[in-house]
Image (cartoon, rainbow, N blue to C red):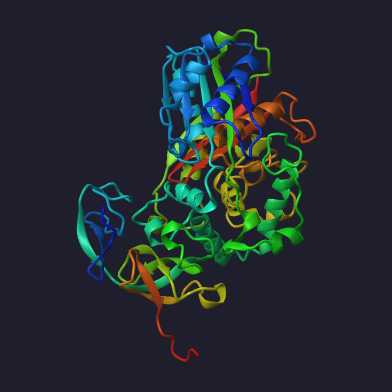
């Protein structure tokens, strides 16, 4: 395997895009390529992600992006893995570059849902659940994660304030991130006063529907030679799956796919959780961040919510989590989310995260979940 | 694809190797990988192992909110998910509550609480 680097990473402002997915994706791709000191012609393969392109009457977005970049002859493929689509695309890019099949690859994820009303968007999201066995019985995505939250609350007696602390932390981080959908802090009073969406989850436990685009350029060390940015060395690129349906899981206190992917990733990287300086994790709901930190091995099962409420995961805490604001507050443009986690890590390691710097940025982990854990990606990056 | 509800009964599968009982369709066992599942009728009574009260529903349940969405462990083995139109608030349900399946008025597995002895 060849040593593989992330040499460029760019995202737009999440929230509401005026332009189409195709335009936004092409724009952030060009930005990431230029930032890497490369030209579009250096790209050997494009891995695109755009789950809900159908809402814009558009499929097959890869060739359109390549056309817009002036490289129509370059192969492309669209990768779908629900909310983990662009981290799955990153994994494919890694496999191609590390395996020697191409020297440089573009990973780009984009989503636009703001032209839909909330009900239609909720229904689009629910497509990634198991239709006959979950959705048809009344489930929504907040509902499925709320079910996990209820099982967790029963087992470990969590309080609303514990989950609230996750939302408050992530909003505080997003307030300092120019890419973020919500650039405002919230108080515990605001959190507690927000309406219940799916008990015990309140409005402020839930990530928003966001538009957004993010791109990452992956290249072989030997191809780049003299990088113009501080590259991220890909120390691990691991994926795993788990039983899709809640009803078939032995317990509801975590996501098995996260545990499996984390084990693989730490083994690949020859690292342990204690070696990680900061993380971007999949916090589509506050409970998801708690479960992720436990499943990844950072906190013993049942202690995550308490640790979070005590400030351990704050930006200046012992283990900064979601310095970007996370899905919760930076926003969750489904197919752009995984790539945008890498953008945050790239910006932190390149001194570009002005005003939201983590104390130490040598080694970082990105965790991205598809749906309720049917799929999961874990990447580990470090500086050279 | 058919759901697991049919003719007022809950249908699923049993693994001939490890004995897993599941409602979810498949050709092989999701627990042990054994490629032989036989059809099995599931029992219809059980207890709630997790729940939520949904106030913002999906499109198919637009006129039904609020309602409970539940994961139920069936007495005869296996778990299913379902919804409970008669449960509309957190204080009306607890983990461990006894429930039973009822043929609902719309597609989707529907549960009702068992009448508790001494309940108001």
Indicate the position of residue A247 as horizontal and vertical percent values: 39, 59
Indicate the position of residue A68 as horizontal and vertical percent values: 52, 17
Indicate the position of residue A72 as horizontal and vertical percent values: 45, 13
Is A2 on the left-hand or right-hand side of A186?
left
Indicate the position of residue A377 as horizontal and vertical percent values: 50, 36
Q: Residue furthest right?
A: A355
Is B68 on the left-hand or right-hand side of A174?
left
Looking at the rendered image, the quarter that the C terminus of chain A falls into is top right
Number of numbered labels in the structure image: 0
| Frontmost residue, A55 versus A252 | A55
Is B77 on the left-hand or right-hand side of A104?
left
Whether residue A288 is visible, yes or no, is yes
Quarter of the figure with residue A163: bottom right
Q: Residue at x 48, y 50 (%)?
A: A120
Q: Residue at x 54, y 37 (%)?
A: A112
Q: Residue at x 26, y 52 (%)?
A: B1
* Placement of A188 over or under A54, stated as above or below: below
Whether residue A95 is visible, yes or no, is no
* Placement of A355 over or under A28, stated as above or below: below
* Placement of A117 over or under B100, stated as above or below: above
Q: Residue at x 56, y 20 (%)?
A: A217
């Amino acid at each position: 395997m060849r040593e593989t680097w992330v040499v460029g990473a760019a995202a737009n402002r999440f929230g509401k895009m005026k332009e189409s997915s195709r335009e936004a994706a092409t724009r952030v791709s060009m930005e990431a390529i230029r930032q890497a000191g490369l030209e579009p012609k250096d790209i050997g393969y494009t891995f695109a992600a755009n789950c809900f392109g159908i809402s814009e009457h558009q499929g097959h977005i890869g060739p359109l992006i390549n056309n817009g970049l002036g490289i129509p002859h370059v192969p492309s493929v669209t990768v779908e893995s629900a909310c983990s689509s662009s981290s799955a695309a990153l994994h494919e890019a890694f496999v191609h570059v590390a395996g020697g099949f191409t020297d440089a690859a573009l990973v780009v994820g984009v989503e636009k849902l703001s032209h839909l009303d909330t009900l239609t968007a909720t229904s689009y999201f629910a497509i990634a659940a198991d239709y006959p066995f979950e959705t048809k019985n009344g489930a929504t995505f907040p509902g499925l994660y709320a079910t996990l939250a209820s099982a967790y609350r029963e087992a470990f007696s969590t309080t609303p304030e514990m989950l609230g602390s996750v939302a408050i932390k992530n909003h505080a981080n997003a307030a300092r991130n120019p890419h973020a959908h919500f650039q405002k802090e919230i108080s515990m009073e605001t959190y507690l006063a927000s309406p219940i969406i799916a008990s015990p989850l309140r409005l402020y436990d839930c990530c928003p529907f966001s538009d957004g685009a993010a791109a990452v350029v992956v290249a072989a060390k030997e191809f780049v030679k003299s990088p113009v940015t501080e590259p991220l060395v890909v120390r691990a690129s691991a994926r795993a799956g788990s039983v899709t349906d809640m009803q078939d899981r032995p317990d509801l206190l975590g996501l098995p796919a996260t545990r499996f992917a984390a084990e693989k990733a730490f083994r690949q990287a020859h690292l342990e959780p204690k070696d990680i300086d900061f993380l971007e994790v999949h916090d589509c709901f506050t409970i998801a961040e708690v479960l992720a930190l436990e499943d990844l091995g950072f906190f013993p099962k049942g202690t995550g919510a308490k640790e979070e409420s005590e400030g351990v995961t704050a930006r200046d805490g012992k283990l900064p989590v979601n310095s970007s604001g996370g899905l919760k507050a930076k926003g969750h443009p489904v197919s752009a989310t995984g790539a945008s986690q890498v953008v945050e890590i790239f910006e932190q390691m390149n001194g570009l995260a002005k005003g939201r710097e983590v104390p130490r940025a040598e080694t970082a982990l990105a965790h991205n979940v598809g749906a309720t854990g049917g799929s999961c990606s874990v990447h580990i990056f470090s500086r050279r | 694809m058919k759901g697991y509800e049919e003719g007022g009964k809950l249908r699923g599968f049993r693994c001939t190797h490890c004995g897993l009982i599941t409602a979810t369709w498949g050709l092989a066992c999701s627990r042990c990988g054994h490629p032989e599942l036989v059809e099995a009728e599931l029992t219809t009574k059980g207890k709630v192992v997790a729940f939520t009260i949904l106030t913002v529903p999906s499109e198919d349940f637009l006129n039904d909110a609020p309602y409970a969405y539940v994961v139920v462990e069936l007495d005869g083995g296996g778990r299913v998910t379902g919804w409970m139109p008669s449960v509309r608030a957190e204080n009306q349900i607890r983990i461990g509550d006894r429930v039973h399946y009822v043929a609902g008025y719309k597609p989707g597995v529907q549960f009702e609480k068992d009448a508790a002895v001494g309940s108001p």
